[in-house]
Every structure is written in C-alpha cells, then in structure tokens.
Amino acid sequence: MALTLRSSTSFMSPLDAGSMGHRSAEEGPVVMSVAPTSKAACGRLRAVVVAKAAAWTAKPQLRREDEEVAVALHGAAAHRRDGGGGAGVAVYVMLGLDTVSGEGRLQRPRALNASLMALRSAGVEGVMVDVWWGLVEKEGPRRYDWEAYAELVQMVQRHGLKLQMVMSFHQCGGNVGDSCSIPLPPWVLQEVDENPDIVYTDRSGRRNPEYISLGCDMMPVLRGRTPIQVYSDFMRSFKERFNDYLGEVIVEIQVGMGPCGELRYPSYPESNGTWKFPGIGEFQCYDKYMKASLRAAAIAAGHEEWGEDGPHDAGHYKQFPEETGFFRREGTWSTSYGEFFLDWYSKKLLEHGDRVLAAAEGVFRGTGAKLSGKVAGIHWHYHTRSHAAELTAGYYNTRRRDGYVPIARALARRGAVLNFTCMEMRDEQQPWQAGCSPEMLVRQVRQAAAAAGVELAGENALERYDEMAYAQVVAAAAGAAEDGVGLSAFTYLRMNKRLFEGESWRHFVAFVKKMSEGGRKSELPRSDRSHSDLYVGFIKNGGRRSSKSEEAATAAW
C-alpha cells in the first residue's frame, strides 16, 4: 500500500525573492510516495522523495492534502530523534536569513512546508531562525510585528519539530554568508544619523552600523531608552506573544550580543572590501563612549597617558601580524601597556554579554526555554603568539593566556549554552600562510567549556555538503564527549535547495543518523533495494514526458 502526494511545491531554491519564478501548471507536480516497510515496525517509513529542481512558490495557503501527508509522515518518522536522553546529538538546521521578508511576511510558505517535512523525516530535531530586530520593531519604538514568526512557529509545531529562535539585534548584510540586507530599525538609524558615536568606530573614524556600540549600553541614546532596555523590551514582547510555545516548541533562545549575533566586536567587516581573509582586523574602540571608558580605566590604573587613544601600531584590517608593531612576535601586545589595553577591551565585551544575558534571563526564566550565546570561531593566525585576529574581536587569547575560559564562565553564570562555530573545519584545508588551526581552537573551547561547567553546542561556519565536513563534525562531537562536556546540539548551516539534492541529501541524512547514534558509523545505501530507512533522490521526470518549460526549469538549476 502506498500513499502518493502530488504537490506543485519544489523543495528549495537559493534564489532571492526578486529572481523567483512560479511553477507553471505544465511543469507537473512533485510526487512523494510513502510505503511501510513492515507491519511490525509501523513507526518506520521508507520515503522516496521525487523532486525536480523547480523555482520556489510563494502561494500563501497550504493545501489540506499537504498537511495530511505531513501528519502521516511525522507520526512515524524514519529516524527517531534521541530526544536528549542518551549519547546522541540533536541536529537542527538554520533557515534562510530572509525567511521573513522585509514586508514582514513569511516567504515561500509551501516550499518551507515541504522542506520541514523532509527534515523531520531525516530525524532532524528542529530548525533555527533569526528574529530580526530590524523587521519586528521596524515601524517605531515598542511597535512590534510578530505575525510572520507566529505563522512559522505554528508550521514548525505541525511538523513535530523544535525551534531555536535568535534574538538578532544586529543588521544582516556585510559579512560572510549574508545573502540579503536587513538593517537596524529605521528609527534606530535616525538616532545613528544624529549621534554617530552610538555605533562602533575604528581608528580611522569609519562607522559600522551593524550593531549598537557596547560603549553606550547604559546610556539613554535610543529615544530615551538604553540599548539594554530596548533589547529587554523586545524580548519581553516576544515572550508575551509566544508564551504558549516556550519550552515546548521554542526550546532555545539564542541571544544576539554583537555582529552576526556573536559575542564579539565587528573587527572584520567584509562590506565594501574593508576586510579580507586572513586579515588581522582592527580594534573597534573609537566612539566617544568607548574612549571615555578607556580614559577612566587608564586613570584608575595610574597611567593616564594610556587612555589618550587606542594602540597606534595595530595596523590595518588586511595586514598580517608581523607587519605591525603591536601584533608581531614580541610586539606591543606583550608589554604592560598592551596587557592593560587588551584586558580592558576584552572585559568590556564580557560585561556587555553579561548585561544582555541578564536581561534575557530576567525575561525567560521559568519558561523552559534554554538561553544560548554564540562565540565566533576565529581560527586564523591561531599559530602566532599574539592571536591577532582574536584580539581585535575582543577575545584575549594568546600563546600565554586562555581567553575562552572567561567567556565560558560568563555564559555559565547565566545558565546559557556556549554555541561555537567552525566545527566542520580541518587544519589541512586552510591556507598555510594564514596560520590557521580550527581544530586546535575547537579543542581549546571544548576544554574551556568543561572547565567552566557550561553546556556546549556547535555550528558549521561555512556552507558544506561533503562527507569530509560531516565527518569532522562527528569527530568534534566525539572529542567533546571525551573532554567530559559533550555537545548538546549541532545546528547545520543552512537550509537551501542544494541541501535537498541527491548526493548532498544522502550525506546529510547519514550525518544526522551518525549524530543521533553518538558518532557510530552508519551509511545509507545508494539505492533503495535494501529497504533503507530513508532515501532521497531525484528520479528523472518521474516517469512522465518532459515539456519544454519543464526542461527549461530543470536547466535553470
């Protein structure tokens, strides 16, 4: 007996809204056949997803038969999730940055529905989505629009999945992987125009509108409210709107604390070619609020002259450590002045993180949802003594000093999960001249998490679809377990059309299964003859004759 779904929805497309087309009636449906493999194992299905590469559809309503099949499929998923009890690691998948449009609407809902169905079948625990400050509070202070996110939460709930929701107080655009532009709320940018010092500033005076400077955390610079008050009000409104889902569907709130949602300074912005890998970046301490703090700290240290300005010999964004006086082998970083400055700069970041997390803790305490904070995987120049790229980002980590234990302790103090990136990277894949070591960095962060007693989760830094990257993540999870900390979850970046294509999807499903089994080897067959739990592939034309429009759509991908 088989159940067949005919839907005009294709799985995924990386195109943006401006380039999306609609699937025509001539192009035919996508066919999904679901058949039980045995009567005894009624909870297990063998799914064969037959899908052509077709453009995303933007029709707002889900057909009844789509949801009926989703319920049937989810009620007996091929790979059961571990649910957190046991050695398995729950896998989440990041949704697109533009899941909610600039107009505040959920984009491509039918394509999203089909994709969630596939993820659930693969054994994925849930999905992650950015909740953009620039969209929700766009119309003015305390005027929040949650409706598109409410639609998403309900859709995810129907599929039996969980949600990690990111309080994204930063702009989207200008960094690695940013595929769309979502600025800060217009009323906030008006305040920036009137007082440019409320955003981060480098030595040359370049302003960065990605995130409000931590220097004015406690200053009423946003229409009479401090940034911390604004973030707290935003999160409180979120809680009021989604209180019924917190702890059940919405299981984690990741609290944005800087650019890209990470606890760091915007020291390596890619916009307008400002920075290029593997440049050291620049210190971001030249707005008037940060400079006032530096002066006060220098006076307190008995060296007023140290507070006149930031380091004069720290170089420029694209330089290497040895090209600067500050970061070279025995540079200024290792002097009394350098140690004073780096200690102040890194402590200001930790204090900011603690203030934002304290606000989140006050809002979400008792809801059952975990808090988490994201820390960037800055792995280049790791083999040098100064670790220059980490220093400019605010991580005081050098050959002589562990900069991640203080970060881990700060998160542990608020009961937050430490979410770390670059889990998929291998040293051998990095350019030798950049002095990279993502593997040593991940190991150091694992050990810091264990020492601080903080829960650890991971992400991949770049989009990867190959077996080698997945194997590295599995190895990192196994290493975390050996260090006594384990990985509580792994969030895969990112859901798009390529993920659902034949080989990419097969690798991903095998990876999810390995993570659920604690890293034990398990492969899916390349064909469906052995009655695999889940096989996803593209079958040419689905037994139908191709039309010209259909061939054109396929060729477009």
Image: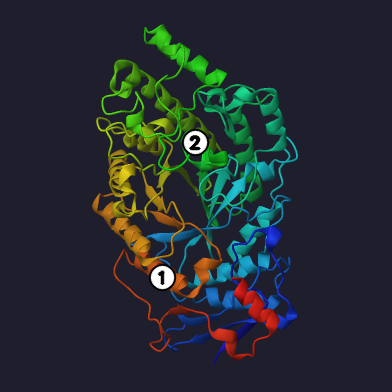
Numbered circle sitting on residue 507 = 1
Q: Secondary structure at mark 2?
A: helix
Q: Secondary structure at mark 1?
A: helix
Q: Is residue 436 visible?
A: no
Give the percent coordinates (x, y) of residue 379: 35, 43
Q: Quadrant of residue 467?
A: bottom left
Mark 1 or 2, nearer chain start: 2
Residue at (73%, 65%) from the top-left corner?
60
Residue at (55%, 85%) from the top-left corner?
540
Q: Quadrant of the C terminus?
A: bottom right
Q: Does 257 sit above or below residue 44?
A: above
In this view, the residue in front, 47 or 239, is 47
Name the residue beneath numbered marker 2. Answer: 357
Label 1 to label 2: alpha-carbon separation: 36 Å
In this view, the residue in front, 107 or 393, is 393
What amino acid does circle 2 point to?
A: Leu
Give the percent coordinates (x, y) of residue 533: 42, 80
Give the percent coordinates (x, y) of residue 44: 45, 80
